[in-house]
Amino acid sequence: MGLRERKKEKTRLAVLDAALDLFLEQGYESTTVEQIAEAADISPRTFFRYFTSKDHLVLWFHDHGEGIILETLAGRPLDEPPFTSLMHGLRAVLADVESSTDEDTGRFLKLRRLLEANPQLFGRSVARGTQTEHTLADVIAGRRGVDPQEDQLTHLIVAFAMSTMRVGFEWPCREGTVTEIVARMRETIELAERSLRPGWDAS
């Protein structure tokens, strides 16, 4: 990463940190873009160079995770079972979480607290997750050589894979350290993979 890119990343994280702190201190709806910009020592115009809206700022981790999964899929063999490829994508997301800095971990936990405290934001997070499923369905359909608008199996495969991530991150509760969350997510992936084996019985 060059100097220019490092400076841009530093500014982006400063905006994110300022916003998360303000959201948790005074509420999401009560916080304005102008307040976030002032806390990050930038202009509102500069804010919009990094984020299109407050919602985009809160849901940035969806963009990040989606990018990791798409990059992983691009590197998987085309003849690999699609669910297996998607599980490799989820493991890549976990690896990214595990390699995070303490600052990244703090942001992740703040975001979880924010979503917990704001049901409307949690709903927007679910909606953004649905967009990711549609994007992944297009990719998986292309790998399978089928029409994503016609093939239900493609959407079932993607929905099951992404449900694995949701269950892993949210069950039995959304609390816990990053280490505990990652461990639970890994267990959920392994459970999902076992459940697809012929003759497997959960009882």
Image: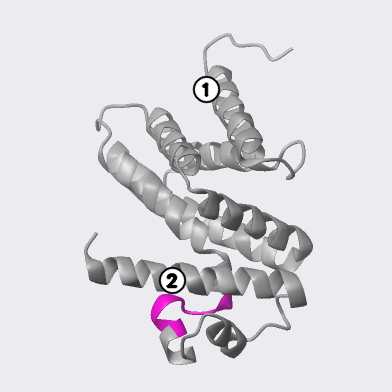
Q: Viewer-proximal residue, 17 or 114?
A: 17
Q: Is residue 108 above or below residue 198?
A: below
Q: Secondary structure at mark 1?
A: helix
Describe residue 105's horizontal placement relative to residue 141 as left or right. right
Q: Please state the horizontal and vertical placement of residue 145, each as a whole percent of the image.
A: 28, 40
Give the tally of numbered discs: 2
- Residue 159 is drawn in which quadrant? top right
* Three-letter code for the amino acid on which mark 1 is drawn: Glu
| Up-down relation of residue 60 to residue 162 (above or below) | below
Left or right of residue 165: residue 144: left
> What is the distance, in whole Å, between disc 2 and disc 1 at their CAs?
37 Å
Q: Is residue 71 magenta?
A: no
Mark linked to residue 12: 2
Q: Residue at x 44, y 83 (%)?
A: 48
Q: Quadrant of residue 20?
A: bottom right
Residue denoted by label 1: 193
What's the magenta bit mostly, secondary-structure-wise? helix
Badge 1 density bin: few <14, some 14–19, many ≥20, Cα 10 Å: some
- Where is residue 183 shown, x and y percent of the image? 60, 29
**Residue furthest top in the image:** 199
- In the image, is residue 184 above or below residue 72? above
Report the span colored magenta: 47-54
Side of 150 relative to 166 (left or right) = left
